[in-house]
Amino acid sequence: MNDDLHARCRRDLDDLPNSDPANGLNCLLVDWLADPEWVETARQIPPCDRRQLLAELGASLFDRDLGGYAAHVRDCTQTLDYVWPAADREELLRRHCQFLLAGLSDNLSYLDPAETQMALDEVEVHGVDYLREAQRAGRGVLFLSVHQSHPAFGFKHRQFAGLPISGVANLQHSPSDSLSMLLLGVSDRVRLLPISSAAVRQMLACLRGGESVAIYADYLYPQSGAATSCLFGRSVTISSSAVAIAVRTGAAVIPVAVARRWPIDAGGVDVRLFAPLSLADLEPRHDATLPRAAIRFGVAIEGLIRCYPAQWRLWGTLENRWAEARERKVALLS
């Protein structure tokens, strides 16, 4: 089975066209998970072996620049020398490719109850006292994530047992939407809300009732409102609804990172909760409050990425995100 999966993946990766490095690889990963034959073959392999096999293919993807993906993420990060020198950035991006493919194994694990328990046994939760403090205060919790590794490592863990969790998802996603992969195996634990004004009302009610909402504030759906924030020294846009909800409800905004440890073959997953964002000094009705809160969200997002940079999925979008923010600013001024 290992040879069958390796041969199939190697062939498909070799066939990646160079014409669309920004989307080609992500589309292929989604296609694999949507293909019953690929899934069945992969599920015959023990999770640790499957994860290692996929990680090796990820290294080959980077080393051989298949589909032009390695060149693409290098271009998108070439201005970050002040954070990671060239040699460090090269290693970071190679590991990123390994985690990108190895993460497919975890998607499959959360489709199988036995593998789910094995996956959760790998998890170490840090900073849970921040969550307990918010619960004791009767405050809702807004989990701010950049979705590193699979979110079920956190939300299905016993430390989160009994905590109602809602999350916003593009439930009308297209088959090529790579973010849909992160929904596999979580719908039985997380109540998924569509992107709509009705969902905003539900989120407000959840938080005011002391429940929790998980948001992926580092990604802006086309139909979402935008707020200007910052990422790696430049302007980006993030969800204005997420920022407004946090300010209006007074919920504890807790950044959370979910990340597989390096080296991949050693196993282990960190679920790390950080101190809540400081927003209490902001007056909800003041005109400057939302812009100031959005900047604080951006600083938290960048902090999460820097903690586990190789596991961040969106290095290939960085230049586009900066460009989109510039275009929105021009549009607003014109």
Image (cartoon, rainbow, N blue to C red):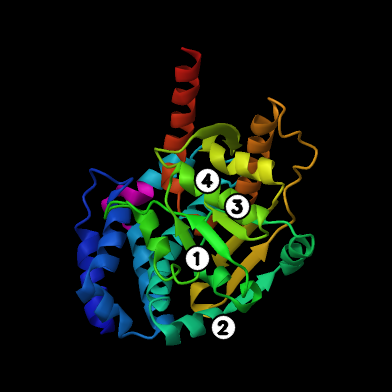
User: Mark 1 or mark 3, which has the lower sequence index?
Assistant: 1
Measure how far apart labels 3 and 4 are at the Cα level.
9 Å
User: Mark 3 or mark 4, which has the lower sequence index?
Assistant: 4
Q: Position of residue 223 (x, y in %)?
A: 40, 38
Quadrant housing residue 295: top right
Q: Quadrant of the N terminus?
A: bottom left
Residue shown at 26% from the left, 66% from the top: 34
Measure how far apart labels 2 and 3 are at the Cα level.
33 Å
The residue that mark 2 highlights is 121
Which of 280/196 is in front? Answer: 196
Could you tell me which secondary element the residue under label 3 belongs to?
A: helix
Q: Amino acid at mark 2?
A: Asp
Measure how far apart labels 2 and 4 are at the Cα level.
34 Å
Q: Tags 1 and 2 in contact by the CB under 8 Å rule? A: no
User: From which residue to which does the magenta span run?
Assistant: 64-71
User: Mark 1 or mark 4, which has the lower sequence index?
Assistant: 1
Q: Position of residue 133 (x, y in %)?
A: 78, 63
Could you tell me which secondary element the residue under label 1 belongs to?
A: loop
- Mark 2 burial class by Cα count in 10 Å: few <14, some 14-19, many 20+: few
